[in-house]
Amino acid sequence: MPVSNSYLQALEAESIHILREAAANFRKPVVLYSIGKDSSVLLHLAHKAFYPAKPPFALLHVDTGWKFREMIAFRDRRVGELGLELIVHVNRDGIGRGIGPISHGAAVHTDIMKTEALKQALGLHGFDAAIGGARRDEEASRAKERIFSFRSAAHRWDPRHQRPELWRLYNGRIHPGESIRVFPLSNWTELDVWTYIQRENIPVVPLYFAAERLVVERDGMLIKVDDDRLTLRPGETPQPRWVRFRTLGCYPLTGAIESRAATLSEIVAEVTSPRMSERQGRAIDHDQSGSMELKKREGYF
Amino acid sequence: MASPPPDLADKDLMRLITCGSVDDGKSTLIGRLLFDARLVPDDHLEALARDSRRYGTVGDSPDLALLVDGLQAEREQGITIDVAYRIFSTARRRFIVADTPGHAQYTRNMVTGASTADLAIIIVDARKGLLAQTCRHTTIVSLMGVRHVVLAVNKMDLVDYSEQRFAEIVAAYSHLAKRLGLASTAAIPISALLGDNVIRPSAAMPWYSGPPLLDHLESAGVEASDTQPFRLTAQWISRADPEFRGYAGTVLGGSIRPGDEVVVQPSGARSHVARIVTSDGDLAEAATGQAITLTLTDPVDVVRGDVLTAPDRPPHVADQFACHLVWMDEAAMLPGRPYLMRLGTATLTATVTELKHRIDVETGGHEATKQLALNEIGFANIALDRPAPFDVYDDNRDTGGFILIDRMSNATVGAGMIRFPLRRASSLPWQTFTVDKAARARIKQQRPCVLWFTGLSGAGKSTIADGVEKRLLALGRHTYSLDGDNVRHGLNRDLGFTDADRVENVRRVIEVARLFCEAGLIVLVSVISPFRSERQLARERMTEGEFVEIFVDTPLAECERRDPKGLYRRARDGKLANFTGIDSPYEAPEAPDIHLHTTEMSLEQEIETVMKALRNRGVID
């Protein structure tokens, strides 16, 4: 490998440095594995950071019960190939109460099945650090997020009292019950992620590639009919359209984009000239301007 | 993006910081860079149009500053409140912009952003010229070792694009920069609002022949210095299998190849690099910035925090140094108080032994001071609990910069830049004596220890200590009593009652108690010692098990009622400042070894409780 100071190598090295700091600073860190492209990159970097040993982390997937079926299949296959420990956590209480995105809407579903579920899982297993793939370019409030981001014992983020972060020095000291969220991909963009996936040949969920899929148009979004729980409204008929997903979440809340980008290089070309930001397909962000900041303060990842 | 490059990965990375306030048009400038470079997605532009109507400050046009001011709270207040990082790319370069506010109370944010910056843009309003904040920004940029500085003279449209006005500001600034130790700066006249000389040359300023701002940002050098000596801090010791022992870390200076000799600091052990291991295969060479795993040819001992270094240009190894220190916490920095230090990957205990001066960032002048408050910058000597390897900050930011962490709150409270090593106590070897503490204790047939009575003034510390000492004496034990009031008549008569002086007062008492303990005595200390940090320090300075913290727990109201020395009355009357419990805090012990609830016990019971605890510890039979 030639010695070079290209920015993609600089980003890779920075992320590896952060992952090693996470391993060294915490008693029981965990990787929050969301199955998406950022998580795929994160796993790849973790493999590099600790090679020839295995990454000293388990993976945690918070399953809302509404993920695309292809995501779950991909998850189980990848985790098996990598030989890593996977913990799947479901908010049983939420399931018992019948919480879902269609019946309760994006806000309630996300709060109970994702944010609450994540807090439950972190508490249940006693994880003192949760490593996630969030990036600063995704959304305005993320731009202020630290790389080692402190959470109180109640999992709250206080954007006004964050620990200053200088040089490559990360402060991971916490009291019992408190935790740190670690974001090794903070300085990556969507384009970096795809360029890196292409360069390193990293497997991702096939939903990212354009194909003809059955979708309905709902509230301005193209929703994939992933199973029969998506009850159709009057006037809605599923139609085959050439679409792909820029982000993956709960299928009734995740809009597809019309695209013919069916290969990595086509995706890179598409992302290189974006007309729309990456999270435009996410219903969760659009309740109101600044809504991500509110959710993050409550403990959303 | 205007023109997508053929291979994105060939771009390099520049980190920059923008210095200025909202009034200078800082956020507007960054917004303009993003907007003109067509880096703003359509849905963000729609949100911008919507938000401009609601929060905007420029009438019907899109308020570009709103692209940058992220958090809801600050939009409502119309100010940027923290460090935010923006990422954008041009055909030639990837930029990470640290956006930090210019208000006086936010020096810490700017220091944070400047710590990793290759280039700083200092923004000046052409109408106002240089302000106090310009000096502040320049001082910080200089202290933080930012290599390139660009003076952006903004709002040229409001001074009729006057060449003369620009020249005046540039002349004044070059004088300031020289005085504050900045090597070279570029100056560009711009209008962020209208886009002049931001991305495109300005037709309104034909007299300016230099490049627009973006051209300058794209061409300033960011090369990692290959002339630095090799440095790698051990982050993680990799034991993939019983045979494999690798040292994972980031190359923080120079380069390394298999076969090169390395020295492990601070131990000084020597070995050679066997392999540079990565998952993409072994490397023939690794350079600054690369994250690698090294194996060595010899089984030398390396732990996290050690630094692997080039043998010919070693780092300093010392336990004291002089540094610039930026304070970042609401609670002031107190000389004598121990803090945790992160230096590279090592965690040390650090104490400011001498605060030389404070820097007035608005003039660059020096002032005498006893402590550092939030957002103040000082020059100080620091002592570590053990020798550590480091470089001078100007030689290497990563091995010469450190943060301080409060031991109680775990907050990051300070950041420092090492200027030069000090060779003091570390160069005086400890004299070893054959008669030691154990021998002195043996002849007295006792176990030495320190009984530390803490509590409010008037709680009854000295009375109980006196009672305990009498009982010990009756048992034939050798004791000594150190009383907080009494030491202030002699050893500590130069100290007052500010937080800084209280810390030093307790530090000296700790050291004296330690000496008496070394002499084999049972030492009784009665001192308010209001801060947990100093009591923690006392525990750490003694041998494990020797320190007994006794909390004489008398409620404030009861102490005030007793008021044996009339001090509370004087404090309430405003005749006595910094009185513990009144206008100076007392941090009660969370888990004392002995807890005496004095309102529920007689003096005799209190003394007996202490004696019983000493019997349980084997101090007395």
Image (cartoon, coloured by chain):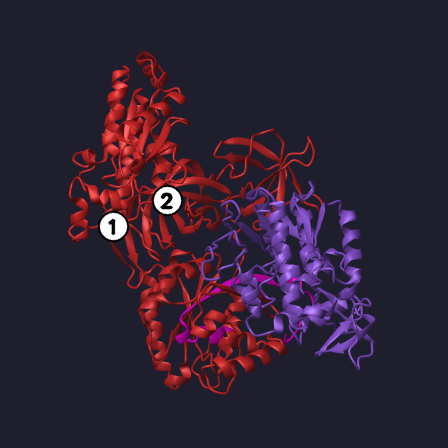
Q: Colour of chain B?
A: red
The residue indicated by pointer 2 is B420
Mark 1, Cα crowd under 10 Å, few <14 / some 14-19 / many 20+, is: some
- Label of residue B137 in the image: none
| Viewport quadrant of the C terminus of chain B | top left
SS at mark 1 in the image: loop
Identify the amino acid type marked 2. Phe
Q: Which residues are magenta?
A: B1-30
SS at mark 2 in the image: strand
Q: Is residue B600 left or right of residue B119?
A: left
Label 2 chain ID: B
Residue B615 lies, in percent from the top left, at 37, 20
Residue A177 lies, in percent from the top left, at 53, 47
Tell me which residue sits at (40%, 60%) in the image.
B141
Residue A163 lies, in percent from the top left, at 46, 55
Q: Earlier in the sequence, mark 1 or mark 2?
A: 2
Residue B471 visible to an observer of this rendering:
yes
Label 1 chain ID: B
Question: Does the magenta segment cover residue A77?
Answer: no
Residue B195 visible to an observer of this rendering:
no
Mark 2, Cα crowd under 10 Å, few <14 / some 14-19 / many 20+, is: some
Question: Does the magenta segment cover residue B10?
Answer: yes
Chain drawn in purple: A
Instruction: Determine the CA span between mark 1 and mark 2.
Output: 42 Å
The answer to which of B531 and B194 lies nearer the viewer is: B531
Q: Is residue B229 above or below residue A281?
A: above
The answer to which of B439 and B29 lies nearer the viewer is: B439
The residue indicated by pointer 1 is B582
* Label 1 in the same subunit as label 2: yes
